[in-house]
């Protein structure tokens, strides 16, 4: 394992490739992205694209996928107030046991800001089965992500809306900007081929879900449906120079967004702004940390390093202190939900821990494994 010379992206970061100068893919992309960034020109491209979707009297101009969090609040306001489009917001929400009060409150804030919103809620029994199976396969978000991404084109087709906005490609797993590197970098119609949706495969659910109707919320419309209904997905992040975790959180907080109140020692969430609508993301980030040697704090700070807001050496201290942190209460809550014991939880997680990077620590409940690597240096 080695680190990018500029930021703290490790070589274990999925899809990264270091160049001869030791820069990671994301930094290489970012430097090019910023150097060529022409805000006026990008806005022009966006206006040209969106123009043809405007002015229909019978439906909304576009759909925006929202959770009520920092990215969606910023996007919704930007699209309505700057682009002057009439958006319909769509939120695929979590089951009551998973949804946080904070998430419900932030979603209400979006409605209060004057938006029309449709909430879809896949049945909790199927949700739980898929989540559990996903956990044993190393990614409990596999099912939820399919539902989340499928809800937008499904609603778009039903309401005859052709334009859909996402903030960025991929998801929390790979929040960096490399996820949108494609020929037309803002074109989200390629999403189905990306790692998140894995070609929308549902064959892994066959042995646990008997009634196929229960899988409807997880079915991403086919390429044919996209063509027939002229669906176009656009990643908005590509058009905004200051699109970042921290900037979006700041901007949205000024517009009524409430952030996570638990401390970073318990959450590994440096600014308390990630996935506010559920808490098991903290568990997921801890598992990611054990798999790849980096967690949410690294994600946050890589943005900040690239934007020149923090020095690499200062970022290292924060990463060493907080990355991968997860209070046992979140693990307990997750285990209760999928009805497994904590020892079962850890024996499953241990299958995915990168043993080259971590060593077992039997002393502490909250840190089951200790890193063998040195942040910023590697192994
Ligand atoms: Zn880098």
Image (tube, helix red, strand yellow):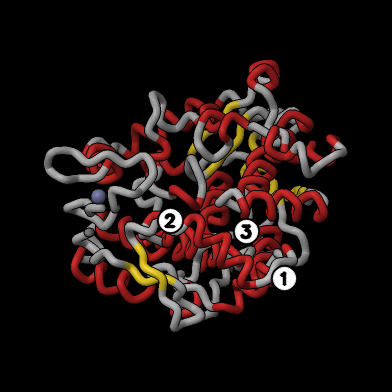
Image quadrant in which you'd find residue 344: bottom right
Image quadrant in which you'd find residue 87: top right
| Rendered residue at 25%/45% (across/down) | 24
Name the secondary structure under disc 3: loop
Farthest residue in the left direction? Answer: 21
For disc 1, the neighbor class at 10 Å (few under 14, some 14 to 19, many from 20) is few
Q: How many marks?
A: 3
Dot 2 or dot 1: first in sequence order is 2
Q: Where residue 282 sits in the image (x, y, percent)?
A: 53, 67
The Cα–Cα distance between marks 3 and 1, rounded to whole angstroms, is 26 Å
Image quadrant in which you'd find residue 100: bottom right
The Cα–Cα distance between marks 2 and 3, rounded to whole angstroms, is 29 Å
Where is mark 3, residue-wise? 68
Q: Are marks 3 and 1 in contact (CB under 8 Å)?
A: no
Circle number at residue 336:
1
Where is mark 2, residue-wise? 291
Closer-to-camera residue (277/345):
345
Closer-to-camera residue (318/377):
377
| Rendered residue at 68%/37% (across/down) | 204
Closer-to-camera residue (148/12):
12
The Cα–Cα distance between marks 2 and 1, rounded to whole angstroms, is 23 Å
Closer-to-camera residue (131/111):
131
Farthest residue in the bottom direction? Answer: 363
């Amino acid at each position: 394992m080695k680190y990018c010379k500029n930021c703290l992206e490790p070589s274990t970061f999925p899809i990264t490739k270091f160049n001869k100068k030791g820069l990671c893919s994301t930094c290489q992309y970012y430097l090019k992205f910023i150097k060529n960034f022409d805000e006026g020109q990008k806005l022009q491209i966006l206006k040209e694209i969106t123009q043809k979707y405007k002015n229909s009297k019978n439906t909304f101009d576009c759909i925006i996928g929202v959770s009520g969090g920092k990215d969606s609040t910023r996007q919704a306001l930007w699209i309505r107030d700057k682009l002057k489009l009439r958006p319909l917001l769509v939120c695929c929400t979590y089951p009551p046991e998973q949804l946080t009060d904070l998430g419900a409150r932030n979603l209400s804030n979006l409605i209060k800001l004057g938006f029309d919103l449709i909430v879809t809620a896949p049945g909790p029994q199927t949700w739980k089965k898929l989540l559990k199976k996903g956990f044993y396969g190393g990614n409990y978000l596999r099912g939820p992500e399919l539902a989340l991404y499928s809800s937008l084109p499904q609603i778009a087709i039903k309401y005859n809306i052709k334009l859909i906005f996402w903030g960025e490609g991929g998801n929390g797993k790979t929040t960096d900007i490399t996820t949108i590197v494609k020929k037309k970098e803002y074109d989200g119609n390629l999403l189905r081929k990306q790692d998140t949706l894995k070609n929308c495969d549902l064959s892994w659910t066959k042995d646990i879900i008997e009634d196929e109707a229960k899988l409807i919320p997880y079915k991403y419309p086919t390429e044919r449906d996209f063509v027939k209904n002229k669906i176009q997905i656009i990643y908005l992040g590509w058009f905004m120079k200051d699109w970042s975790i921290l900037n979006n959180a700041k901007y949205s907080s000024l517009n009524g967004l409430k952030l996570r109140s638990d401390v970073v020692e318990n959450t590994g969430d440096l600014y308390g702004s990630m996935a506010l609508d559920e808490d098991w993301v903290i568990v997921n980030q801890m598992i990611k940390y054990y798999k790849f040697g980096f967690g949410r704090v690294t994600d946050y700070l890589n943005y900040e390093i690239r934007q020149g807001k923090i020095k690499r050496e200062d970022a290292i201290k924060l990463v060493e202190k907080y990355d991968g942190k997860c209070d046992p209460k979140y693990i307990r809550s997750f285990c209760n939900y999928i009805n497994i014991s904590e020892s079962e939880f850890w024996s499953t997680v241990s299958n995915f821990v990168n043993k080259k990077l971590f060593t077992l620590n039997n002393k502490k409940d909250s840190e089951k494994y200790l890193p063998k690597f040195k942040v910023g240096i590697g192994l």
